[in-house]
């Protein structure tokens, strides 16, 4: 019996020629390191939370009317009868951990970042998986527009660090829950007579979560939405002032953005600022997004604490980089590959390898007893800078032949001085 990876999942493997970027583990390490570095620069610390949380937490905080919870969660009951859900996004678990561990008493402002897998039962296609990965950040305890601007700058800074260009930052405000409720009422009144002309999806949204109608990608809905009431007409003054200040800061930071009055995003918990970063080379597909969620911490049982954050899909970053044709960094190779000729030499190489590694040399050896040519090919495949060849003659004299894999020049060197030569 042969098993394939479960539908909508894929394996991340050692780099090899022709391998898709999304399956290349060296690129994942590079993405993750880049994200960690920029988060450290901005003063964010890592948090790691379980990949499953209580069913209730996920369903209530993401929102029962959202597409994610309505159709896409992996829910299960444990043998002990606990109802759990694999996390479909990062924020709910981080908020739960913030409250469970009472992080709010440690400092007035908490800045957290995470990297990890999320699970959504979606129809798999390019750039859409059932297990995908996000890098995210959350800034908790600051309600001012500076925090919104910082979080957006952090997301953009990550892409810039990777060399990813051709991005659009879409920005909107969804105001306070009160002003939004007023707006949703008006939106429903407007939509009701038009329902027969709208897509099935927007009919469902009308019934379950009317605000999400604005996000429809169906041409028939988009045409109708041109006449829909505008959320900005329902914003209270404080929301308008906050939004104006966020935009002012972004401009001052030199971060271009486009206002998109129909941007509402897929979660119920947002208040005020919402944003999405889209990739032009991926046909304006979202690379990531986020927003402010001032009521969420209270909703999961913590003290009223404002928050803002984002989640960036990492698979899509790799797809966009590949599409842009940016030369992606390659895995670094070995300092040396040891090639023993014969049984006695193999035994010596085992000790030599341990010795060189203890000295800090990045090295490996042949374990297959192949012929010289095959071993040198493997040295090339491992991107070894040098091949260290050890046969009976060399052994007898306490030396090794060191072959420069680029110039092909060979020299004989005493075993004691090898590590200096190789590093
Ligand atoms: P969301 O949490 O829905 O706002 O998604 C944030 C980002 O995660 C999106 O912009 C995508 O880049 C990525 N993402 C979300 N769902 C998937 C998925 N099923 N497969 C791959 N990437 C995803």
Image (spheres, rainbow, N blue to C red):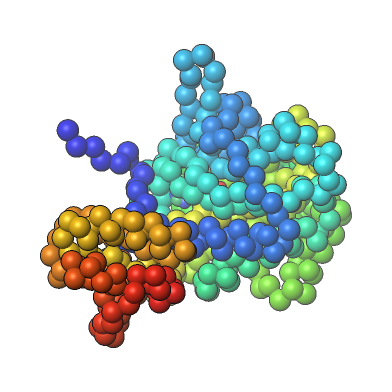
Residue in the picture at 34% in, 61% down: 352
| Most foreground residue, 389 or 382 | 389
Residue in the picture at 61% in, 52% down: 136
Residue 406 shows in the view: yes
351 relative position to 34: left or right: left
Residue in the picture at 35% in, 59% down: 353
Relative to residue 334, is residue 292 depicted above or below? Answer: above
Q: Residue furthest top?
A: 80
Relative to residue 293, is residue 83 depicted above or below? Answer: above
| Most foreground residue, 256 or 347 | 347
> In which quadrant of the rendered image does the N terminus lie?
top left
Q: Residue furthest left?
A: 371
Please tell me in which quadrant of the rendered image residue 369 appears.
bottom left
**Numbered-mark total:** 0
| Most foreground residue, 358 or 62 | 358
Q: Position of residue 411 (x, y in %)?
A: 28, 82
Q: Position of residue 419 (x, y in %)?
A: 42, 70
267 relative position to 389: left or right: right
Residue in the picture at 40% in, 63% down: 356
Q: Position of residue 186 (x, y in %)?
A: 70, 44
Q: Position of residue 17 (x, y in %)?
A: 27, 66
> In which quadrant of the rendered image does the C terminus lie?
bottom left
Residue 378 shows in the view: no
């Amino acid at each position: 019996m042969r098993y394939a990876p479960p539908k909508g999942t894929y394996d991340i493997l050692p780099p090899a020629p022709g391998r898709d970027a999304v399956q290349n583990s060296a690129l994942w390490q590079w993405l993750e390191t880049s994200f960690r570095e920029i988060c450290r620069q901005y003063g964010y610390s890592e948090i790691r939370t379980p990949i499953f949380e209580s069913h209730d937490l996920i369903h209530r905080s993401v929102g029962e009317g959202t597409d994610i919870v309505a159709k896409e969660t992996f829910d299960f009951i444990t043998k002990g009868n606990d109802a759990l859900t694999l996390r479909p996004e990062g924020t709910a678990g981080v908020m739960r951990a913030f409250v469970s561990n009472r992080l709010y008493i440690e400092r007035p402002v908490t800045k957290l970042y995470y990297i990890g897998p999320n699970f959504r039962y979606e129809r798999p296609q390019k750039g859409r998986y059932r297990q995908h990965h996000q890098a995210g950040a959350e800034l908790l305890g600051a309600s001012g527009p500076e925090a919104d601007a910082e979080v957006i700058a952090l997301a953009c800074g990550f892409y810039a660090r990777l060399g990813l260009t051709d991005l659009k930052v879409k920005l909107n405000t969804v105001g306070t829950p009160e002003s939004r409720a007023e707006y949703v009422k008006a939106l429903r009144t407007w939509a009701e007579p038009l329902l027969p002309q709208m897509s099935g999806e927007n009919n469902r949204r009308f019934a379950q979560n009317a605000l999400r109608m604005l996000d429809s990608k169906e041409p028939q809905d988009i045409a109708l939405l041109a006449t829909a009431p505008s959320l900005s007409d329902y914003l209270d003054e404080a929301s308008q002032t906050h939004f104006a200040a966020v935009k002012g800061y972004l401009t001052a930071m030199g971060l271009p953005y486009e206002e998109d009055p129909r941007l509402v995003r897929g979660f119920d918990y947002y208040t005020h600022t919402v944003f999405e970063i889209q990739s032009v080379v991926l046909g304006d597909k979202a690379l990531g997004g986020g927003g402010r969620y001032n009521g969420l911490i209270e909703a999961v049982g913590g003290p009223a604490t404002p928050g803002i954050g984002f989640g960036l899909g990492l698979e899509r970053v790799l797809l966009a980089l590949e599409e842009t044709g940016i030369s992606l960094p390659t895995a670094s190779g070995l300092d040396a590959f040891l090639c023993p000729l014969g049984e006695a030499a193999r035994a010596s190489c085992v000790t030599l390898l341990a010795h060189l590694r203890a000295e800090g040399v990045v090295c490996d050896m042949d374990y297959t007893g192949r012929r010289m040519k095959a071993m040198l090919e493997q040295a090339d495949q491992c991107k070894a800078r040098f091949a260290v060849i050890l046969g009976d003659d060399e052994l007898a004299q306490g030396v090794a032949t060191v072959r420069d894999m680029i110039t092909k020049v060979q020299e004989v060197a005493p075993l004691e001085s090898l590590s200096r030569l190789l590093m």
